[in-house]
Image (cartoon, rainbow, N blue to C red):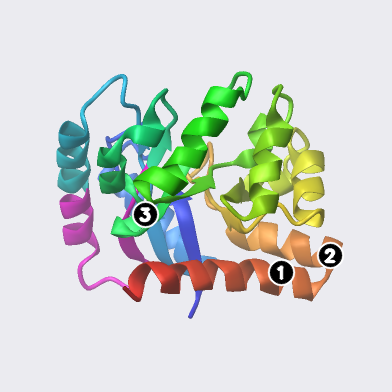
Amino acid sequence: MGLVDIHSHILHGVDDGSKSLQMSLEILEMMKKQGITDVIATPHFDAFSESIEDFNEKVNTALTELNSATAGLDLPNIHVGCEVYYFGGIGKSYGIRNLTLAGSEYLLLELPFTTIDDNIIKDINNLCSTVGVIPIIAHIERYHRFKGFKKILKLIESGEILAQVNAPSILDSHFRRITIKLIKKGYVSYIATDSHSTDRRPPMLEQALNEIERLFGKTQRNIIVKNLNNLYNNIFSK
């Protein structure tokens, strides 16, 4: 099996990701060259701006068009998920189960760029215990300067939640130091492209994995790849 990308914005016209069907095809071609065989499209969902029903209709329309355009082409398989932006009370929202990664128990969760207070932690706990999903914190490296960040790390240590970092953050000077530190300390399970376009945020998974191998050795690279493959198998074997 090749590489799996669990966080991308390749569906055109849905969010701030791909702007056109042609761009989506170009992103998929770039992913293919990096050895990515499967990609989960995870457009942003914000409960403050739209309903789940309207969101899913928009996503399904874009997916249908993209699947038609890729039919017969040797490009990565496309699956659907969502990057859910945190909102108060999410831990009691059973409708969130409609926004998991390919209908699985895993939820890609984007945190607010503010203090991570006890209410957020309680909601995350409730997502696990009440709603029955396993949160994967999207691009965890972005929250490290916010008060309460250590509370998220404790949840990871306890095994209640998982964390993902963006591939460019391993190479980018702005987030590089914290990203490498989080990987070194074992807080990171997954690396994903978080691709938005062919230029502003292109897929860089292969480059990131090569850098991990350079810094930590092949064993650490293999751990990340194995984690991605295990997640894929957990999602699609049920």
Q: Is residue 161 left or right of residue 179?
A: left
Q: Is residue 144 above or below residue 159?
A: above
* Residue 157 x, y percent position in the rendering: 70, 51
Q: Quadrant of residue 74?
A: bottom left
- Residue 18 magenta-highlighted: no
Mark 1 crowd level (few <14, some 14–19, many ≥20, 10 Å Cα) = some
Q: Secondary structure at mark 1?
A: helix
Find residue 216 and name its label: 2
Q: Amino acid at mark 2?
A: Phe
Q: Secondary structure at mark 3?
A: helix
* Residue 88 x, y percent position in the rendering: 42, 23
Along the line of sight, the residue nearer the viewer: 54 or 14: 54
Q: Earlier in the sequence, mark 2 or mark 3?
A: 3
The residues colored magenta run 63-82
Q: Earlier in the sequence, mark 1 or mark 2?
A: 2
Residue drawn at 30 percent across, 47 percent down: 97
Q: Amino acid at mark 1?
A: Arg
* Residue 192 x, y percent position in the rendering: 55, 53
Quarter of the figure with the C terminus: bottom left
Find residue 221 and name its label: 1
The residue pinned by badge 3 equals 101
Query: In this rendering, does residue 35 appear at all?
Result: no
Along the line of sight, the residue nearer the viewer: 58 or 23: 58
Q: Amino acid at mark 3?
A: Leu
Along the line of sight, the residue nearer the viewer: 34 or 169: 169
Residue drawn at 43 percent across, 42 percent down: 127
Q: Is residue 133 above or below residue 15?
A: below
Mark 3 crowd level (few <14, some 14–19, many ≥20, 10 Å Cα) = many
Q: Are marks 1 and 2 in contact (CB under 8 Å)?
A: yes
**Inter-mark Cα distance, 2 to 3:** 29 Å
Q: Nearer the viewer, mark 1 or mark 3?
A: 3
